[in-house]
Amino acid sequence: MAADKTLHGAGNLGALLVRAFRWFEEGLATDPDTAHLPRLSGTQFMALASLDGDGTSIAELARRVGVTRQAMHQMVGELDKASLVDLVDSPSDRRIKLVKLSLLGRTLDQKAAAALGDLEAELAKRIGKGAVADLRKHLAADWGPPGKSRAKG
């Protein structure tokens, strides 16, 4: 039987990666140490995970997350209203505001990191330490830009 090549097919790598992301996201939502913290959408989670320690501009965050600047402005406004981020002046350009984790955001980050470590340990029990190590190695590799390879040969 031929492999299902549809978007919803069982072998679609992108769909499998999304499912894996959701597994971790649901694990955070049900963990006793993180369940009481604000629930983040996948895009909000990616935005917070994309912040540099010394702050990141909204334009750079939008680029990293793959959304428009307008969408990122709205999301940062929501995160600021939830007290998860602070907007601070850029030391190099007065026109730019940088997005940084607030005290609550740093608390969320630390608790989420610990819970994710526990989830990773649980995953290692289920699929094996070697499989988790291989998964980490392959996901951390530089895949180059998306699209077909332009290499000659």
Image (cartoon, helix red, strand yellow):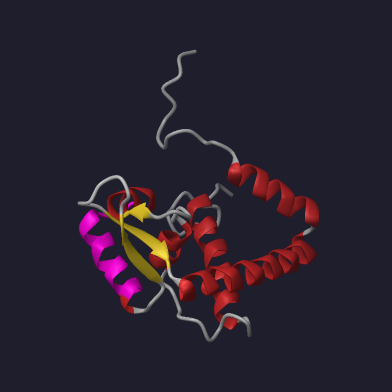
Give the percent coordinates (x, y) of residue 127.
75, 60
Residue at 22 percent across and 51 percent down: it is 94
Q: Main secondary structure of the magenta part?
A: helix
State which quadrant residue 80 falls in.
bottom left
- Residue 54 or 63: which is nearer the viewer? 54
Magenta span includes 149: no
Q: Residue at x 30, y 67 (%)?
A: 75
Counting labels gives 0
Q: Which residues are magenta?
A: 66-80
**Which residue in the rendered view is the most extreme toward the top?**
153
Q: Is residue 11 left or right of residue 115?
A: left
| Residue 77 x/y as whole percent | 27, 70
69 sits left or right of 23 in the view: left
Who is closer to the viewer here, 95 or 77? 95
* Residue 59 spot, x, y in % from top left: 28, 50
Q: Residue at x 74, y 69 (%)?
A: 122
Decide if residue 20 is on the left or right side of residue 122: left
Q: Is residue 83 above or below residue 69?
A: below
Residue 45: name its quadrant. Answer: bottom left
Q: Residue 153: where, in percent of width, then height?
A: 49, 13
Q: Is residue 72 magenta?
A: yes
Residue ID at (41%, 22%): 150
Above or below — where is 47 with respect to 133? Answer: below
